[in-house]
């Protein structure tokens, strides 16, 4: 049985997060290499039960879900996608916290540091 994820469901990236991802890809020496993409995922842990994971990768696995937003290729495993559907990756460089964070409509609560969540 095929899983119907619909056409409007995805993982998105803000303009500010896109700029930071491109800068980090350049710093890592993988900018301009078409095989590399941003891998996002969800792992167990953190004070709310689930934590986000970000990395650069070049290998798409058989059950991966692949998206593109604003020219950034975003890949996640199917299990993580069930938690991340319609989530937007954001970046903040403000005084109240610096770094990537997720606007996740599926999270019922998140911790104070924003690095973990629960559904």
Image (cartoon, rainbow, N blue to C red):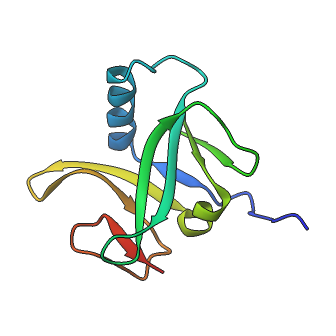
Q: Nearer the viewer, residue 114 or 68?
A: 114
From the top left corner, tell me how far across and down residue 30 is, in percent: 45, 21
The residue depicted at 42 percent of the width and 47 percent of the height is: 54
From the top left corner, tell me how far across and down residue 32 is, in percent: 50, 16
Q: Is residue 114 left or right of residue 68?
A: left
Q: Nearer the viewer, residue 79 or 106?
A: 79
The residue depicted at 30 percent of the width and 76 percent of the height is: 47
Q: Residue furthest right?
A: 1
The relative height of residue 117 versus residue 62 in the rendered view (above or below) is below
The relative height of residue 53 versus residue 59 in the rendered view (above or below) is below
Q: Can residue 70 be seen in this view?
A: no
From the top left corner, tell me how far across and down residue 116 is, in percent: 35, 69
Q: In this view, does 65 lie to the left or right of 91?
A: right
Q: In which quarter of the image is the N terminus?
A: bottom right
The residue depicted at 43 percent of the width and 53 percent of the height is: 53
Q: Examine the image and state in which quarter residue 61 appears.
A: top right
Q: Residue furthest left?
A: 95
From the top left corner, tell me how far across and down residue 55 is, in percent: 44, 41
């Amino acid at each position: 049985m095929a899983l119907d994820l619909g056409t409007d469901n995805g993982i998105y990236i803000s303009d500010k997060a896109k700029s930071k991802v491109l800068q980090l890809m350049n710093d890592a020496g993988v900018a301009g290499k078409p095989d590399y993409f941003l891998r996002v995922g969800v792992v167990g842990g953190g004070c709310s039960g689930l934590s986000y994971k970000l990395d650069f990768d070049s290998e798409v696995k058989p059950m991966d879900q692949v998206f593109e937003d604003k020219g950034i290729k975003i890949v996640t495993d199917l299990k993580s996608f069930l938690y991340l559907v319609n989530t937007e990756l954001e970046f903040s460089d403000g005084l109240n916290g610096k770094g990537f964070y997720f606007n996740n409509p599926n999270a019922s609560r998140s911790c104070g540091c924003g690095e973990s969540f629960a559904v």
